[in-house]
Amino acid sequence: MCMQPNKPNDSPEQEEDDDETTTTSAPQPTKTSMAPSSTVLLAAAVVALTLAPRPSLAVDPVSTYCAKNFTAGQTQASISSVLATLVPRASTAYYATAMAGTGGSTIWGLAQCRGDISSSDCARCLAAAARQVASSCRGQADARVWYDYCFLRYDDADFVGLPDTGHTLILINTMNATGDLAAFDRAERSLMARVAETAGDPASAGLARKTAKFGSEGTTIYGLGWCTRDIAAADCGLCVAQAVAELPNYCRFRRGCRVLYSSCMARYETYPFFFPVTGDDDDVAAASSHAGEYETVILNHK
């Protein structure tokens, strides 16, 4: 098995949802029971972060996972067939599943793009994902590759429709937040709780984007939750909630953090990273001062 991380004040906290701005207290997120809590630390690395959201340039994977060695030529043929089907279908529909082969050589696959990027960027991201698994996971029947804007997976076990939080990738910004840390913490927790709630709403189609402000200068925190479309809306909400519950365990007071599973992810940053870009010019210009480096932690839930 291999998993490879890649370079990639006292004022009230205000939450923004489209045109609505509210002031709330922050609930404490509760960890769900979708996956056992025992973990094994497998790897740690430091990766570079792309500063502003530019999907046309996002061709480097966040991480690649490969497992299950095989030698049968028919299994490789099934993998090639699945990839050849997934990429063109998902490039136009933003989501696709596929199956190829029979018996022990059957392969199931899934490919998906985030719904806030263009179809051309979706196609480019998925083409890069297919090349990545073909080169890094050849001879292995379980492959998953995470990009900022797309996700691709295949396996010799049918995973489609089953929430999967077994393999966890956590990207921790090495820079701490500044200013009133307690206010930042309250705003981030409340924001991400809303992200998880929205992700579980069928109307969201598995993509939740929210913002919140904190501090006397009204600094914006950007939050996102995203699920693969094969799982039910309720499972999506639970999956994102589980990811959100990990954030304070690894990233409290950090300027940004990502928790990625095979079925969902949760992320917050202090600069715009999703589309449409909701921040003003000052937010985008300040991205370089809020980005920093990310420490990558990979966990395997038993």
Image (cartoon, grey):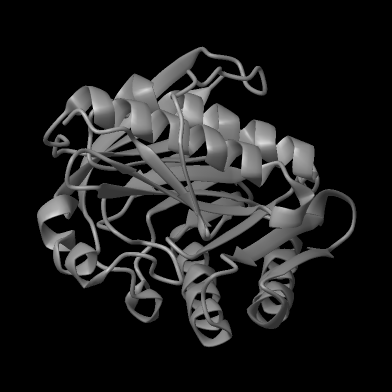
Choose between 138 and 220: the one closer to the eye.
220
Relative to 300, residue 223 above or below = below
Relative to 154, residue 158 above or below = above
Choose between 241 and 169: the one closer to the eye.
241
Q: Residue lying farthest bottom?
A: 120
Residue appearing at x 55%, y 17% in the figure: 30
Give the quadrant of residue 84. Answer: bottom right
Name the side, left or right, on which 99 lies relative to 133: right
Q: Position of residue 20 (x, y in %)?
A: 52, 53
Residue appearing at x 69%, y 65% in the figure: 79
Residue appearing at x 36%, y 33% in the figure: 187
Give the number of callouts: 0
Name the side, left or right, on which 174 lies relative to 107: left
Q: Position of residue 283 (x, y in %)?
A: 22, 63
Q: Position of residue 282 (x, y in %)?
A: 17, 67
Q: Please state, as top left, top right, bottom left or bottom right, where the C terminus lies in the image.
A: top right
Relative to 149, residue 229 above or below = above
Name the side, left or right, on which 134 lies relative to 81: left
Name the side, left or right, on which 239 lies relative to 124: right
Q: Residue lying farthest top?
A: 38
Q: Let me know if residue 230 appears in the view.
A: no
Q: Position of residue 246 (x, y in %)?
A: 44, 25
Choose between 36 and 259: the one closer to the eye.
259
Choose between 24 and 144: the one closer to the eye.
24
Q: Let me know if residue 215 appears in the view.
A: yes
Relative to 63, residue 14 above or below = above
